[in-house]
Amino acid sequence: MTPFRISPLSLRYALAALGTATLIAPATADTSPLQQQLDDLQAFQVIAHRGASGHAPEQTLPALELAHEMGVDYLELDIQMTADGELVAFHDERIDRTTDGEGELRDFTLESLKALDAGSWFNAAYPDYADEAYAGVEILTLGEVIEHFGTEMRYYLETKSPELYPGLEEAMVEELEAHGLVESGSVIIQSFSQESLQKVHALNADIPLVQLVWYYPESDDSERLVEWTGVTPGPSEITDADFQAMGEYAVGIGTNLTYQDDLQVIDAAFIEQAQANDLLVHVYTVNDPAEMQKLLDWGVDGIFTDFPDRLNALVD
């Protein structure tokens, strides 16, 4: 049986009407901020995928500020490392798609990345959402994001392509600890790499972790689904023991709902089985309100979306 869940957004808006809203519920005298975060995760979470990236250039300040204004539970960001060892919020391994530069991100210093235009591409790609103010926006460092929004916001960070960046996990944990995000219960780390998550767990076991998975057909002519990194069997073959193995280091699983938009790869039974084995289920990246509602009906624990406003309309 799926437990009854109260949306934190609904509670937040009710509090706002009373003039007492806060982004994160304060911990009670006998509840630590870390425990409060875990408690809050039992309610449905609205996760802004790269910020409100359907409305503004992904992972830039306009997208993050807009998501913050929408009252999301988490700002989701991909973290990579520059040639001079700085942590930046950026998704692709190459900079070509979302800047006016070309090449591998890891080959650029922070100074050279800061000189790029990370916003004009959005105006060209999505004219219905274009804004002149997006032209020339910068790539952000992780530190800049944290300093801008503080510990009252929560962050959902991915170790992106960690095999390319030796020391990425150590640098991320050091940055998070320096800003007090772990002790304030303000961060989750996710990754497709089990090894990367286990490194984080060894560095600081207080950080909640989410194992990302990607399910897809084994071959073009096969109905059998497999997982991209092999961290689990396909959804039809996954066992309680597989979920329990993830639970040794992670609090949840982050999964795709569909493959190439037309093949559904998980169902309500998958979510129920994961939850029965004490794992949260967060699904990415869902922008269609009908699919959002289907997942809500299935009792999913959180949804990543480029359009938090659409999801808010369903959970409010």
Image (cartoon, helix red, strand yellow):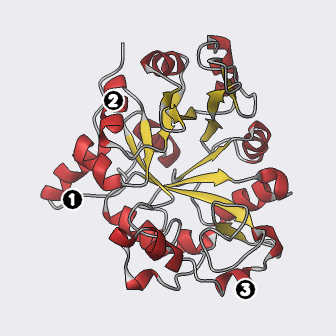
Residue under numbered circle 3: 111
Write the residue at 77% across / 47% down: 203
Question: Where in the figure is residue 313, as x and y percent of width and height?
Answer: 23, 48
Task: Specify the quadrant that holds the N terminus.
Answer: top left
Write the residue at 77% across / 44% down: 196
Write the residue at 58% across / 83% down: 117
Disc 2 is placed on an element classified as: helix
Query: How many residues crowd mark 2 within 10 Å: few (<14), some (14–19), many (20+)?
Result: few
Query: How many residues crowd mark 3 within 10 Å: few (<14), some (14–19), many (20+)?
Result: few
Q: Is residue 257 found left or right of 228 in the rendered image? A: left
Disc 1 is placed on an element classified as: loop
Q: Is residue 289 visible?
A: yes
Disc 3 is placed on an element classified as: helix
Residue under numbered circle 2: 294
Looking at the picture, tell me which residue is in the foreground, 244 or 272.
272
Q: Which amino acid does label 2 sit on?
A: Lys
State the separation of the CA atoms marked 1 and 3: 41 Å
- Using the image, determine if residue 265 lies above or below residue 170: above
Looking at the picture, tell me which residue is in the foreground, 17 or 125.
125
Residue at the far front in the pictured view:
221
Question: Where in the figure is residue 186, as x and y percent of width and height?
Answer: 51, 54
Question: Where in the figure is residue 256, as x and y percent of width and height?
Answer: 54, 35
Query: How many residues crowd mark 1 within 10 Å: few (<14), some (14–19), many (20+)?
Result: few
Q: Earlier in the sequence, mark 3 or mark 2?
A: 3
Identify the disc placed on residue 158.
none
Q: What residue type is labelled 3?
A: Glu
Residue under numbered circle 1: 20
